[in-house]
Image (cartoon, helix red, strand yellow):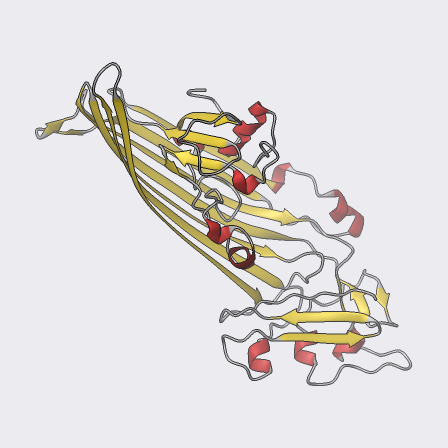
Amino acid sequence: MNHTTLRFRRVRHFAYRHGGPLDPYFTRQRTESNYYTVDGVSGNVGAAPGLGMLLGAGPSGSVAAATTLGTTQALVSVDDLQEFRVQSSTYSAEYGRSPGGQFAFDTKSGTNQWHGTAYDYLRNDYFDANDWFNNYLGVKEPALRQNDFGGTLGGPVRVPAVYNGKDKTFFFVSYEGLRLIQPQEATNNEFVPDLCMRGMGACPSGRNPGSSALQPVLNAFPLPSPSGLDDATNGLAQFLGAWSNPSSLNSTSVRVDEKINDKLRVFFRFSDTASSSAVRATGGSPPTQDTKTASSLRTYTAGVSGAFSSRLSNEFRLNYSSNLATSRAAIDAFGGSTPVDLGQLVGLGPDSSPVFGLFYGGITFNWSRDSNPALSGSGIWSTP
């Protein structure tokens, strides 16, 4: 499939044309068993930030390159894609690394004609109605902003009065940027310590506020919502809130092709994809836990294609890829909360991993910190 006009911005949407979902399964293999190549070199250079690097397939070299948003601009931007192939079985010998589906992507190169594109995909909450759950819980609609923009430019390399690359030297440049503020709808299963436990309100008969030593931890939860439920027996109250999670990416690639003669061609391609995202916790953890991840992937690829005769040809590829992924989880100010440094609170160093558990009325609260200098927090509550 060449020069395909696409509605979506992820190359793995192509898998729908082969009957599978994103990150599709082939021959009953895991999605980590799929193998991706870009211009003939491995694209399985993904790194999973946080615990994914320790417990998952992140360090195995079997995960396809991806951004922190889960998109595939780290492989190739859609407007930089010339051709793709998908094989699900009966592979040739060159596809022996992984037993799953084989995805091959070829990037565009310049021609004797100048060609360029420009685009901007826009979404805004001004055009959208409020979420049903927000309306039901009486929560204001959070912000929604999406700008997916970029462009491409390709043609012959020309330096006036110095060099004319027509029929010989070509370039192709691609850039894609994304600025996304994604709303998180409100839920009714976020519970926090009530005002009595925090020592900020009247207590019913038989109850007392938490001790002064516990107050920094209790106040790290969001404040209860005035319209939420209040379980005075167990010291819990509802927090009803909606927010937006910001993320961004910048994907740039530059390719230069040189036609040495009719039988020998060389190319070099450099790509740089940087992405970041911040996501507040939901469900089992309070939204004051804000996890920020960042990823930076760079690839350097050189190739030589030679046709020595009608029966003999050769393809040579050389590639170097680097991928840096970081994750930082912190307890920050949100919903009236006061941030807390658990390590400092219990007198431990910056590389410690303290966990604080509070058992009260059959409910368990759990705050923890990761081994990074920044705090990580998880608030978990459950009834036995």
Residue at the far left: name it: 161
Q: Residue at x 70, y 51 (%)?
A: 140
Quarter holding residue 262: top left
Q: How many dots with numbers? A: 0
Drawn side of residue 97 relative to residue 381, left or right = left
Counting from the top left corner in percent of width and height, residue 137 is at 79, 51
Residue at the far top: name it: 310
Q: Is residue 172 visible?
A: yes
Counting from the top left corner in percent of width and height, residue 132 is at 76, 43
Quarter holding residue 80: top left
Position of 180 relative to 164 (above/below): below
Drawn side of residue 242 relative to residue 173, left or right = right
Nearer to the camera, 96 or 332: 96
Q: Is residue 200 visible?
A: no
Position of 293 relative to 350 (above/below): above
Q: Residue at x 82, y 65 (%)?
A: 383
The quarter in which the N terminus is drawn is top left
Nearer to the camera, 30 or 328: 30
Residue at the far front: name it: 93
Position of 159 relative to 55 (above/below): above
Q: Residue at x 39, y 34 (%)?
A: 38
Counting from the top left corner in percent of width and height, residue 7 is at 53, 27
Quarter holding residue 337: bottom right
Nearer to the camera, 340 or 319: 319
The quarter in which the C terminus is drawn is bottom right
Counting from the top left corner in percent of width and height, residue 317 is at 29, 35
Nearer to the camera, 14 or 152: 14
